[in-house]
Amino acid sequence: MNSPAALGPHGALKDDPAVFLAGQMTGVEGYTESTASGLLAAINLDRVVRGHAAVSPPPTTMLGALCRHLREADPAHFQPMNANAGLLDALAAPPRDKDARKAAYAERALAAMVAWRDDVVGAPAAVA
Ligand SMILES: Cc1cc2nc3c(=O)[nH]c(=O)nc-3n(C[C@H](O)[C@H](O)[C@H](O)COP(=O)(O)OP(=O)(O)OC[C@H]3O[C@@H](n4cnc5c(N)ncnc54)[C@H](O)[C@@H]3O)c2cc1C
């Protein structure tokens, strides 16, 4: 499907905000990408049923960056997309070393995802 044309900002149909789509059919490509978008669709359906607004993770996370691709890609040239660092917001001071750069992207993404999760879903209960 042409997601930038058909879907709202958080993966629901523009003409039916209680119908969330996920997976390969929306233009994410791959096992992990499809599974993650399905989890987000479930979180958002639960939120909408409970009267809350739908949400997406920040674009410094890979899932958030994929959501941005589905939302903001040019509908005339829309193509499915794997997770890749080119989707993420650029680092303020990217390390020159490739491995260090990847680690910096991952560290920033993990911190952003944990903060988003704690805000949206709630922090997990501490294990005794
Ligand atoms: C040959 C091949 C190799 C791949 N290799 C990789 C890989 O190595 N790594 C990777 O990450 N990704 C790989 N992919 C991509 C990956 O398979 C998909 O991105 C992923 O499976 C999509 O998951 P999904 O749940 O969105 O869709 P799907 O896995 O396609 O699941 C959709 C399901 O819906 C069912 N369905 C369809 N229509 C209906 C209907 N009307 N009613 C009820 N059920 C219906 C289908 O039967 C199917 O079971 C590969 C894809 C192909 C084709």
Image: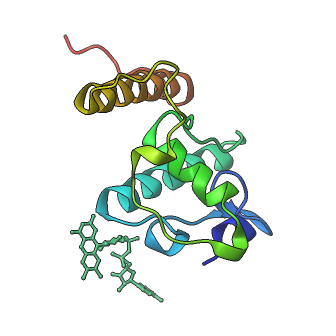
For the residue pair 20 and 80, the one nearer the viewer reads as: 80
Q: Residue at x 73, y 58 (%)?
A: 8
For the residue pair 19 and 107, the one nearer the viewer reads as: 107
Q: Quadrant of the N terminus?
A: bottom right
Q: Position of residue 36 (x, y in %)?
A: 40, 52
Seen from this angle, which residue lies furthest right? 15
Residue 68, above or below 53 = below
The quadrant of the rendered image in which ligand 1 is seen is bottom left
For the residue pair 121 and 67, the one nearer the viewer reads as: 67
Q: Residue at x 61, y 71 (%)?
A: 78
Q: Quadrant of the C terminus?
A: top left
Residue 87, above or below 118 = below
For the residue pair 4 and 39, the one nearer the viewer reads as: 4
Q: Residue at x 27, y 25 (%)?
A: 100
Q: Quadrant of residue 123?
A: top left
Left or right side of 31 for 118: right
Q: Is residue 45 visible?
A: no
Q: Residue at x 39, y 62 (%)?
A: 34
Q: Is residue 9 visible?
A: yes
Q: Position of residue 15 (x, y in %)?
A: 80, 69
Q: Quadrant of residue 33?
A: bottom left
Residue 81, above or below 77 = above
Seen from this angle, which residue lies furthest front? 96
Q: Quadrant of residue 75?
A: bottom right
Q: Position of residue 26 (x, y in %)?
A: 54, 69
Seen from this angle, which residue lies furthest top? 128
Q: Position of residue 71 (x, y in %)?
A: 67, 56
